[in-house]
């Protein structure tokens, strides 16, 4: 029943662009009841989610991730590299990054990201993102109304391997 309520809330909230961020809050409140999070705290607009030894905190637009392996990554609307993965986390960002065979992960909404160089695998999670890639092997797009354009692929046929989940996502080779 809780999954059904979350899905209905997600569909209704997605219709209004100004309420998308509220969807995240609704999900965080329901996550502990579904068994996906052990602890969720919301104080003064800041959010803390704890699950299986990983803690994710947001504060003043920053995202802080701490895991059992004592790996700590802080992101303030910038790109971080960790084990050949470049991550961009945030909303309403406009950035250009350069890659040389790394994997790239974008998490957020309403971002405009340009990637110069070769990306082995690319994943975007969120809504209303505009992504431009020079060269990519595989693409995963999760969310709605994302627009991904790539020039070429390292695959023999010149086409990226594409997986998309959500509605109105557009992946184009130009």
Image (cartoon, rainbow, N blue to C red):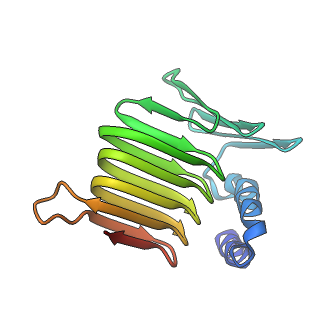
Give the left or right position of residue 130, taking residue 136 as reference.
right
Query: Residue 8 falls in which quadrant of the image?
Result: bottom right
Instruction: Identify the residue at horizontal 53%, vertical 43% (top origin).
Output: 88
Relative image position of residue 64 (x, y in whole percent) = 64, 32
Relative image position of residue 142 (x, y in whole percent) = 48, 64
Which of the image's four quarters has the C terminus? bottom left
Residue most extreme to the top: 70
Residue 135, compared with residue 86, is above or below; it is below
Query: Number of numbered discs present?
Result: 0
Residue 97, compared with residue 156, is above or below; it is above
Query: Residue 6 falls in which quadrant of the image?
Result: bottom right
Residue most extreme to the left: 156
Give the left or right position of residue 97, taking residue 100 as reference.
right
Residue nearest the observer in this picture, 109 or 9: 109
Residue 90, compared with residue 23, is above or below; it is above
Residue nearest the observer in this picture, 66 or 142: 142
Which of the image's four quarters has the N terminus? bottom right
Instruction: Identify the residue at horizontal 72%, vertical 71% (top origin).
Output: 17
Residue nearest the observer in this picture, 174 or 38: 174
Give the left or right position of residue 141, taking residue 28 as reference.
left
Relative image position of residue 72 (x, y in whole percent) = 56, 24
Residue most extreme to the right: 44
Instruction: Identify the residue at horizontal 55%, vertical 71% (top origin).
Output: 144
Relative image position of residue 122 (x, y in whole percent) = 37, 52
Give the left or right position of residue 48, taking residue 69 as reference.
right
């Amino acid at each position: 029943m809780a999954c059904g309520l979350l899905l209905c809330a997600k569909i209704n909230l997605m219709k209004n662009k100004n309420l998308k961020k509220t969807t995240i809050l609704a999900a965080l409140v329901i996550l502990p009841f579904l068994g996906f999070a052990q602890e969720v705290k919301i104080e003064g607009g800041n959010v803390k989610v704890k699950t299986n030894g990983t803690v994710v905190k947001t504060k003043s637009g920053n995202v802080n991730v701490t895991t059992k392996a004592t790996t700590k990554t802080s992101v303030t609307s910038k790109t971080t590299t960790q084990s050949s993965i470049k991550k961009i986390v945030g909303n309403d960002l406009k950035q250009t990054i350069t890659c040389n065979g790394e994997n790239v992960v974008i998490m957020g909404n309403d971002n405009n990201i340009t990637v110069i160089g070769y990306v082995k695998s690319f994943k975007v999670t969120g809504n209303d993102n505009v992504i431009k890639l020079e060269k990519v092997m595989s693409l995963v797009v999760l969310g709605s109304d994302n627009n991904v354009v790539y020039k070429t692929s390292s695959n023999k046929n010149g086409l990226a391997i594409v997986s998309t989940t959500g509605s109105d996502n557009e992946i184009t080779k130009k």
